[in-house]
Image (cartoon, rainbow, N blue to C red):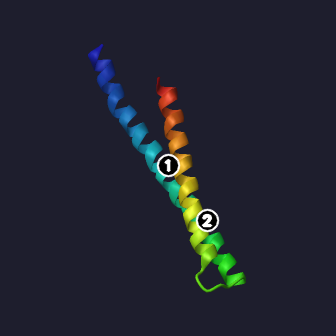
């Protein structure tokens, strides 16, 4: 029975790496889209401090962190 568990462990680790690297790509995409939207708003509605870009970047970071936390919690509940 130990041989069966040993063969599953590397596969399980590989799945975890793939899952979390996918989350990193999604986080990068969310932040990129939010920043891009803010940048485009700053081009159309210029202001002194580029507030739309700042707000877009900060809000997308917060949204991506919330998304990642929810995915990790959901994944840990599935494994139990």
Residue at (47% x, 23% y) in the render: 80
**Element at label 1:** helix
Displayed quadrant of residue 57: bottom right
Residue 57 versus residue 65 in the image, above or below: below
Residue 26 placement (x, y as % from top left): 54, 54
21 left or right of 31 in image: left
Camera-nearest residue between 20 and 72: 72
Query: Of tags 2 and 1, which is closer to the observer?
Result: 2
> Could you tell me if the residues under marks 2 and 1 are in contact, i.e. CB atoms within 8 Å?
no
16 left or right of 29 in image: left
Residue at (38% x, 39% y) in the render: 14
47 left or right of 10 in image: right
Extreme top residue here? 1
Which of pointers 2 and 1 lies earlier in the amino acid sequence?
A: 1
Q: Where is mark 2, residue-wise?
A: 34
Displayed quadrant of residue 64: bottom right
Residue 78 placement (x, y as % from top left): 52, 27
The tag on residue 44 is none
Count neighbours of disc 2 (C-alpha within 10 A) and say few if under 14, some if 14 to 19, many if 20 or more: many
Residue 51 versus residue 60 in the image, above or below: below
From the image, which quarter does the N terminus lie in?
top left
Camera-nearest residue between 54 and 34: 54
Residue at (65% x, 70% y) in the render: 37
Residue 77 versus residue 56 in the image, above or below: above
Residue at (54% x, 34% y) in the render: 74
Residue 45 placement (x, y as % from top left): 71, 82
Q: Where is mark 1, residue-wise?
A: 23
């Amino acid at each position: 029975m130990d041989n069966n568990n040993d063969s599953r462990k590397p596969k399980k680790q590989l799945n975890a790496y793939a899952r979390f690297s996918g989350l990193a790509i999604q986080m990068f995409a969310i932040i990129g889209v939010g920043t891009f939207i803010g940048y485009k708003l700053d081009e159309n509605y210029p202001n002194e401090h580029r507030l739309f870009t700042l707000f877009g970047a900060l809000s997308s970071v917060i949204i991506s962190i919330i998304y990642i936390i929810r995915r990790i919690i959901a994944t840990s509940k599935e494994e139990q």
